[in-house]
Amino acid sequence: MTQIETCGHQLAEILKQQKADYIEARLEESHTSHITYRRGKLESIDNTTAIGGNVRALVKGGWGFTSFNDLSDLSARVELAVKQAQFVGHEESNLATVEPATDTVTAEVNNSPLKMSLADKKQVLDEYNDIICRTPKIQTSTINYGDGSKKSIFLNSAGSFIEQEKVDLSLRLVAVATEGIEVQQAGLSLGSNGDFSSIQGLQQKVEQLAQRAVELLSTSKVKGGEYTVVLDPVLAGVFAHEAFGHLSEADFVYENDRLRQIMTLGTEFGGKELNIVDSAAVPGLRGSYKYDDEGVPSTKTYLIREGKLVGRLHSKETAARMNEQPTGNARAINYRYPPIVRMTNTYIEPRSMSLSDILADIKEGVYVKNWYGGTTSMEMFTFSAGEAYMIRDGKIAELLRPVVLTGNVFNTLKNIDAIGDDLEMNQGGGCGKGAQSPLPVTNGSPHIRIRHCLIGGS
Amino acid sequence: MEDLLAQAKKVAEEAEVFLISSEETPVQFETNRLKHIQSKQSTSVALRIVRQGRTGYATATDLEDNNNLVNMAVETAQFGSEARFELPSFTSFPPVEVFDADVSSVSIEDMVKLGEEMITRVRDHTPDIICEAMVSKSITSIHITNSRGGQADYRQSIFSLGVEGQLIRDTDMLFVGEGQSSCQPITQPDKITDVVLKQLEMAREQASVATGSMPVIFTPDGIASALLMPLTAAFNGKTVLEGASPLGNKLGEPVFDKKFSLWDDPTINYRPGSRPCDDEGIPSQRTTLIDHGVVTGFFYDLQTAAQAGTRSTGNGRRGRGGLPSPFPSAIVIGPGNTTFNEMVSNIREGLVIEQLMGAGQGNTLGGDFSGNVLLGYKIENGKIAGRVKNTMVSGNIYQLLGQIAAIGDDTKWVGGMISTPSIFLSSVPVASK
């Protein structure tokens, strides 16, 4: 038995003896390795192992939480969590009831990086690095590669005992071009639930990336203002995540009467064509899992169907307080944090238009691809494109400097007037919420067109 | 620790052990009431070795299993970069006060009271606002020891206090908030809530601006959210070494306005960014980056400094379990002598920026920033007219900070890591709906 398995069984006994409305514990053992390149050379390579756990207790609606890597006195950790919860709680506890589960979920990974030598991984990265660095006018490259495996044990006072294993892999490549005081960069992010082949065979993409960084040196900034924009599947996925995904996380809503009113199920947010889904139950993606960090089975949840709000993402507490079904969306980035409501694999469902039809009637607009990032304040959000081009007379025209776009959730979704037929899932993203970042998520979408989108510029 | 060092020395020319342990107690309020008390214990040990001239690195949470850690470091050293640095042999450091035993003795009851006081005060002013608050205390211990005899041990205490308010009218959402942190207990929550009440006052009305370039005042929070990232990226010794910093070959040249000075300073007592030495055991020092508009220096860790043929400025920091890398400790922007009200009164039509959302997501390396005004106000005829929304502010710091209209006398710490006054720029691109 491994150390965390032994501790898991000890904890199962300890939880039985404690007086709280609900207690759960999570134990984790992880191994990660990182390889980074800068200045055209391998810069650092490291290995990390971590073992730790946490206990979360609920008493009269108040939560106590302890996290630790010292596994020696588990009883004391449990007692402390209960004591804290007792101090906080002054009302009634309300948690959705979920059938206790005993299960073992192993990671089925093809081409696992865990079975590869550092030398083999390095060989793949060396080639990409060479491609970037041999491009004229490229000043430097930045490559960040990481892979990791995590074994976790979840148990609770209702009798669940779930062992899960996950593998995650991510790669970000950046090419930096310079000329005088001018510095421009282009980036590419990829990831998978462990399959190393997802980052192999990228030679052509990496070459294009380097060339784009150089090309950006001689481009100009778009004039700031409102445009008709067309988003590629990667950026449209980020848009779905930022523009709507976060607002559908029930922990923002459940105790906020005004937001609950705004977010009443059935409210119209977009046109008839718009469907937005979050699903950890889709297998094989970075946001996929069988059970969330509260031991709740994953589901497929429609957030928007035919333009109307039809669902939201829940933890056990938010589901109970809103009288809705739990969706299995409580996630924690690691054992140092309690689970909170998070997205998993979020996407806009495809419709029937081709990209050329979407572009056809745009006299002047902006075509945006790829991402730098995105953020939201719920009502307003920004998302930034790694690539931007003018659209002139229905055709993609000259390259522009990267742009930041912004919108307001209450009208931007309604301004989506074309949805493509080419759904793609982007695995290169990580999501941040509270102090917990980056959490592996997947975003997806086909090409979409948005009218009256505000772009910052010169 | 000494065992680990001894064991590592058997297989490597040089070795360094970095041990960090912390105890943190955050108390969280949600929807105006106490919701969560946490207690977080964490320990981790990092081993850096130089083996056959190459750097190897591994970290673990298990302090007992030295064999595993040494083996993992040896594995990475096969491929690691050529170690150009020499580990330091310092054992004494400048006196920088970053520990106050009073922090650990603040009771949970007192922390809860502080949170309740902040929320009550904000809600007395605006009853329908929904508040979140956080009160947190932590103690961190750091031990560094290396094969050249270098040794550092210190403790840091941090106390943080913050409140955020969300006000929703129809579908319009307003977010206000303020937080402070210190190595000593913070006992006056009024100072924090005063800032929030002022934000609520200034955001009471709504105003709109037209698209175009206009005068903009960045408050200390506005500078932290919009300008800090592009500014610090260019002074990172690693970026300079790569030739990717726009300032790399500008040392000694006036690039910024004469009124503008910027330095990194980890030696100010009781500031969360302060410490007696960096994560490699190099004594802390103040490093001037811009002196009256002239570029005067960059910040370095050991390896980058050695590659660049210069000395470490004591800016080595380990993030997320990785090797040390250059990172600012606490950025200070020199104060001016114009009051905030004087700046406002000189503007016929313009903006005040408190929070720019998404500003760090573009080509920060090239000095660009662009973001949505999450919290900002319109100025009309020298007075605050109300809050602006659906507005993007964009620019490039090398174009904008070359000519600064005025620097404020209102220096403030934002988030514990930057101290800055307000900055008034006379023409910044603004796009609005």
Image (cartoon, helix red, strand yellow):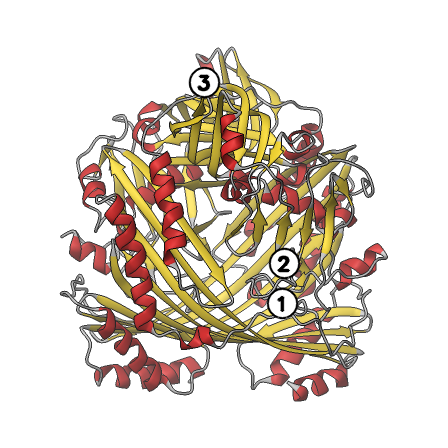
Q: Look at the numbered discs 3 and 2 and tell me whether their residues touch, using CB distance below 8 Å.
A: no
> Where in the figure is residue B197, as x and y percent of width and height?
34, 44
Chain for mark 1?
B
The C terminus of chain B appears in which quarter of the rendering?
Answer: top left
B375 vs A330: above or below: above
The N terminus of chain B appears in which quarter of the rendering?
Answer: bottom right
B355 vs B272: above or below: above
Q: Amino acid at mark 1?
A: Arg
Identify the mark at residue B275; answer none if there is no mark: 1
Say left or right for A447 vs A15: right
Say left or right for A256 vs B151: left
Within 10 Å of disc 1 (Cα), the crowding (few <14, some 14-19, many 20+) is many
- B207 or B1, nearer to the observer: B207
Say left or right for A68 vs A61: right
The residue where tag 2 is placed is B329
Question: Residue placed at 66% from the left, 85% from the top?
Answer: B4
